[in-house]
Amino acid sequence: MCTSTRTGGPIHVGPWGNADPEHTITNIQMGPGEYLYELSGNADDSALLSLKLVTNQHTYEVGAPLEHTTFSMPLRNGKVVAFFGRSDNDHLTALGIYVPVMKGSPVNVGLWGDSGGVPVDITTPVQLKSITVYSTDSSDGRIYGFSFTYVDLTGQSIHVGHWGTIKGEKHTFDLNLQGEYVNKITGTTAGDNRMTSLKFTTNQQRDYGPFGSDRGNAFSMPLPDGKHNGAVVGFFGRSGKSHVDLGVYVGLAPNEP
């Protein structure tokens, strides 16, 4: 892997994990003007099994054929500039990405879903206050609608919704604990690429969901712990008559107690 310094000098990083010469080694050289904006793949409890890297010019696949995904990180208006992760002596066990942002501006990640319907978006968010999901939870269930409340740059609480429809069961949760925020979203999309399930996890180790039916291709967006924790602060997407596609805004987490 390679990154670059602020002065533009290349720095080689790695290998992370095992660079056994008997294994297949894939080198990807980024061309002029080429940048990475989507990363997806498969992983189990011990290692990354495959990776798919999408740039504005090419698609690269590494590892086993990618029939299903367990994680997906598409960027709407951004690019990957570096990586972080975890490794042991044998495997690359986890991989994360760095995305540059303007000060005070959240990062757009997503969409997940079939890209039907009409675009829906919000003013710049700084904190997420509540989420409502409309879903059917049978074996063939899916996500039908979505609404939420967030705080904008002026400090005003704004209720958004509903995107999609209110068909199915209504699930609402509030982020009431001091300093609580969503730091992980997981879900699935089915063969028609409709969103079939959603699950939200907070920094207080509280899970909400899964809502819908956990089937199809999986996606996962965990946010790292660190000096400046990231938090889901809002959403954008596409709204149809019977479905919703979602992307997230990631910003700085609120101050914890």
Image (spheres, helix red, strand yellow):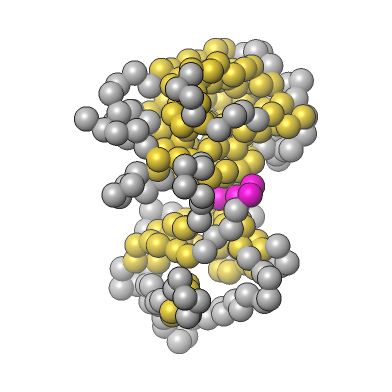
Q: Where is residue 54 in the image (x, y as percent from the top left)?
A: 65, 61
- Please identify the quarter of the rendering in which residue 13 is found: bottom left
Q: Position of residue 78 (x, y in %)?
A: 60, 53
For this orientation, the residue located farthest to the bottom is: 21
- Please identify the quarter of the rendering in which residue 87 is found: bottom left
Q: Position of residue 168 (x, y in %)?
A: 62, 13
- Looking at the rendered image, the quarter that the C terminus falls into is top left
Magenta part of the protein: which range?
73-77
Q: Looking at the image, can residue 160 be seen?
A: yes
Closer-to-camera residue (9/159): 9
Is residue 76 covered in magenta? Answer: yes
Q: Please give left or right for residue 193 compared with residue 18 in the image.
A: right
Exactly how many numbered labels are in the figure?
Answer: 0
Q: Looking at the image, can residue 202 be seen?
A: no
The residue positioned 37% from the left and 37% from the top of the image is 253
Q: Where is residue 9 in the image (x, y as percent from the top left)?
A: 47, 80
The residue positioned 41% from the left and 17% from the top of the image is 174
Dominant SS type (magenta): loop
Closer-to-camera residue (182/95): 182
Residue 54 vertical placement versus 32 (above, below):
above
